[in-house]
Amino acid sequence: MYTEEIKDISENYYNWLKNNHQFISLEDESMEIYSPMLDFFGDSISVNVSKSGDRYYLSDFGETLWNLEIAGVDLISDKKSKKYQLFRNIITYDDLNFDETNHEINKLTTKANLSQTLHDFILALANVSNLAITRRETTISLFKDEVMNYFLENRDKLYPQVFPDVSVQGKSKLIHKFDLTFPGRRTEYIKIMKSLNNNNAKNILFDWQDVEEYRNMTYNTDSRLNIIHQDLESIPSSVLTMMEEYGVEIFSFEEKNKIENKFSKTA
């Protein structure tokens, strides 16, 4: 891709990013931020930001769990359930707070860390919302664990270059997380997705555009995004087209031979 074309894509992306965030001042002197990132139900993810002394308080006002409850998904009543553990894992991983009384997800941060915290907070709300699919018999976490274990258990034999749970800075200076990474002249990043739809596909590309140009230009690498999915036949054709346009390759976890050919040391 030519430099001018990359520059044009970059400018269009950041203009889109700026134009598609809404910042609304409220009467209580807090601010409501509407993100272009979507939840499981296709609605914009919103975050309330208020001042607390010399720090900033981020909150979803309990809307994330409320939306799930309306859809018939109860994450928190049964503390021994797998879906509750998935929810707690997200809260713990992103160092968030959860109020058991009003079901509010919140986070306190400094002004210096506000942008990164806001970005991570929105992604965490999206991940919680996507637990709506725990109504199915198998869960996102079980599939992700299965894929991660496959790569790590075959690290010596097939995948010596694999690194799990890698965080990468994008052009915006925000940090983005990938499940697996194969570094090299061409760095391969992997997202593990049990379910892929128009909403979470847009969120993935939202992050990837921030990372791709920055890594390629700054470190002179050829960065590529890959997705390992459980069932390719369940992916909408519109999502497949979208991913193809951005050069994202999707692999079925059932087709281990294709995964091995792409990522193993013998490839």
Image (tube, rainbow, N blue to C red):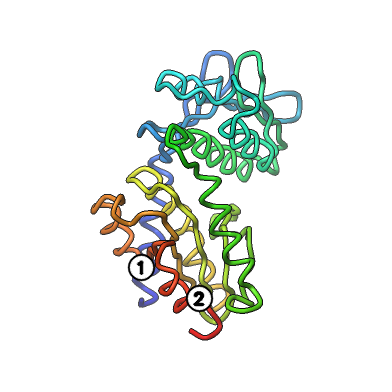
Could you tell me which secondary element the residue under label 1 belongs to?
A: loop
Residue 227, quarter of picture: bottom left
Disc 1: CA contacts within 10 A as few (<14), some (14-19) or many (>=20): few
Disc 2: CA contacts within 10 A as few (<14), some (14-19) or many (>=20): some
Name the residue at 59% across, 55% down: 173
CB within 8 Å, label 2 to label 1 = no
Q: Nearer the viewer, mark 2 or mark 1?
A: 2
Residue 112: percent from the left, percent from the top? Answer: 70, 43
Q: Earlier in the sequence, mark 2 or mark 1?
A: 1
Given residues 216 and 92, the one toward you in this image is 92
Q: Residue furthest front?
A: 137
Establish if 143 lies above or below 89: below
Residue 62: percent from the left, percent from the top? Answer: 55, 20
Apparent side of residue 89 relative to residue 212 in the rendered image (left or right)? right
Could you tell me if residue 22 is visible in this image? no
Establish if 78 lies above or below 227: above
Q: Residue furthest left?
A: 237
Name the residue at 40% across, 22% down: 71
Q: Residue furthest right?
A: 53
Name the residue at 36% across, 76% down: 1
Given residues 245 and 50, the one toward you in this image is 245
Name the residue at 29% across, 58% down: 240
Could you tell me if residue 120 is visible in this image? yes
Given residues 199 and 267, the one toward you in this image is 267
Amino acid carrying mark 1 in the image: Gly
> Which residue in the protein does label 1 denote?
247
> Which residue in the protein does label 2 denote?
263
Could you tell me which secondary element the residue under label 2 belongs to?
A: helix
Residue 184: percent from the left, percent from the top? Answer: 57, 79
Residue 245: percent from the left, percent from the top? Answer: 29, 64
Amino acid carrying mark 2 in the image: Phe
Q: Spatial distance from mark 2 to mark 1, Cα to Cα?
A: 17 Å
